[in-house]
Image (cartoon, grey):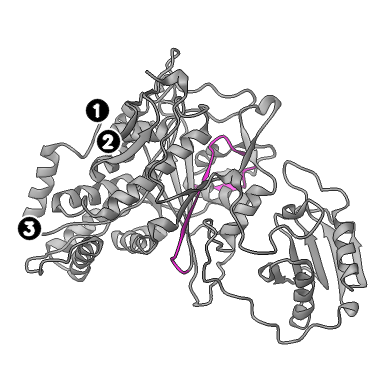
Amino acid sequence: MGRSSTSGEKTRSRVRRADRLGMGKGVGEGGSGTGGGSRDAEGGDAPASGGSGRRAEGHRRGGSAGARGRSSSRRAPKSGKRRVLRWSASVLAVLILATGGAGYVYYEYLNSNIKKEDLTLGDKQMADHKANAAGQTPLNILLIGSDARDSKANQKLGGAKETFGATPLADVQMLLHLSADRSNLSVISMPRDTMLKMPKCTAPDGEVFPASTRDVQTNESLGRGGPGCTVATWYELTGIRIDHFMMIDFAGVVSMADAIGGVPVCVDANIHSRSADGKGSGLKLEKGTTSVQGEQALQWLRTRYGFEDNTDLGRAKAQHQYMNSMVRELRKGTKLTDPAKLMNLAEAATEALTVDKGLDTVKKLYDLAEEFKKVPTKRITMSTMPNVYGTGVNSGRVYPKAGDAEQLFRMVRDDVPLDGKASKRKKPEEPKDPSAPVGEIAVSVRNGTATDALGPASGRAGEVADQLKNAGFGRTTIDSGDVTGVARTGILYPSADLEGDAQAVAKALGVPLSQVKRSTDVSGISLAVGADWREDGAYPVSKGTEKTPESAGALNGEEEGACMKVNPNYTW
């Protein structure tokens, strides 16, 4: 079946290795995490007309692990979730402190398993995070699933023989946003068929990939020097700072799924993902709930033909269901109490992952996992980038949905929870210099509503300027020279003495004060009406609790009852 970590002999060999290192049976390793990947199995997908990226099925799952040390005389742990967490933490603490001896040897062995690459290959410096009221900052982790057919294990699991040795694709991309106060977790999936412009990327070996002049498929980013270009592509599109990435391939998904020991998934009818022309992942399940692991888990994560309308959007929902269910299983703790299973999970995770150089040790991965554990399951929200289908030669491909996609990206940038509940965000400080009378404040308004897919919305600068004049800002003018598009409406001011005036403009229009910034690029107060305000009327997200766009298909982490809808053409 191509599995790499579930056989009884391999488990016994790991236990024997631990015994030889002097660690005993009371030693274990804990951790959790996720990743993704995609391409069709047998036969593969034919590219849509006009596109250059390969179409296929696949997904990837990654993980993080703790560390192992001696535990010869621990007291019996308390029951419940905290028992496992405290037990794992105590094991790690012993190992980290064991700077010599067998524990350290094994720790270094796990570290040597981890593959590392540069965080970003782009030439743009990512913006810093904004701290909340407590001085905390959020964390953004990009999960990448590579469909690489660069090993016998991956070739056996991946199928599609015509792609063996081809440039790998980032067929699954998920951004995990951990809030600054660690109260909530948001996940955004980007369909692999998303069309966008690639930034310039410079590979570690010095090869330069110029910025694209046309829209290309997002999964091609991985072939432009590595995962660091996928990170740069996300930043180019979303403006979201990426702190780390984790990448995993087919074989890694199987080994991780085996080590976890089974994840419950559900379908509303019998399903067999196999078509007459050989397309599909091969997944075959009966109606209802089934615990999948190993190769069957990989099939679930890769299935497109058989779920809903046979698109990446249905596949993303299935991946979200798996991730939510896996988190619930791991938090029950039943899979992390056996030392041998913990050893399997630790080794599977470190062997499966490629990470950025900021996550290059088991200790760092463990610390990251501990941060994620702080989020209650009910505050985990899965979503998909709002999108629309292309037309003509790009029929079947998707584009970010104007307005909705940018709103979702901005919510993540501003650390706004996708579940609509409050988060402890830092309130802007009151300016030292008070605002001048509104009639004396000079404001320049420009139309920055253009996007890659749409031209400027006609008359937007004039309409917003009229709103300001009606509010008493008599010195408002229109800048008709600069039509550069901006994703969200912003107000810039050049010096501290104008900060109060700029905030007065924002308050008059209902624009969040977090979107008022100091900039040396302007000589006075400059208001850019962004793509998030293409329609007439008040600023769209100025009042009340901001809600995630319905087009994002948000799914809560505690939703257990929903089963994937099976396409009638793929039932049995």
Q: Mark 1 points at which residue?
A: 1
Image quarter of residue 12: top left
Residue 146 at x, y = what percent?
43, 39
Dot 1: what SS?
Answer: loop
Q: Name the residue under label 3.
A: 24
Disc on the earlier residue, 1 or 3: 1
Measured in 3D between alpha carbons, the distance from the residue under mark 2 to the one under mark 3, in whole angstroms, is 28 Å
In contact (CB < 8 Å): disc 2 and disc 3: no
Q: In this view, does 361 lie above or below 230?
A: below
> Is 112 positioned to the left or the right of 131 in the image?
left
Measured in 3D between alpha carbons, the distance from the residue under mark 1 to the one under mark 3, in whole angstroms, is 31 Å
Residue at the spot x=11%, y=65% of the render? Answer: 71
Q: Name the residue under label 2.
A: 294
In contact (CB < 8 Å): disc 1 and disc 2: yes
Few, some or many residues within 10 Å of mark 1 (<14, 14–19, 20+): few
The amino acid type found where label 2 is placed reads Gly
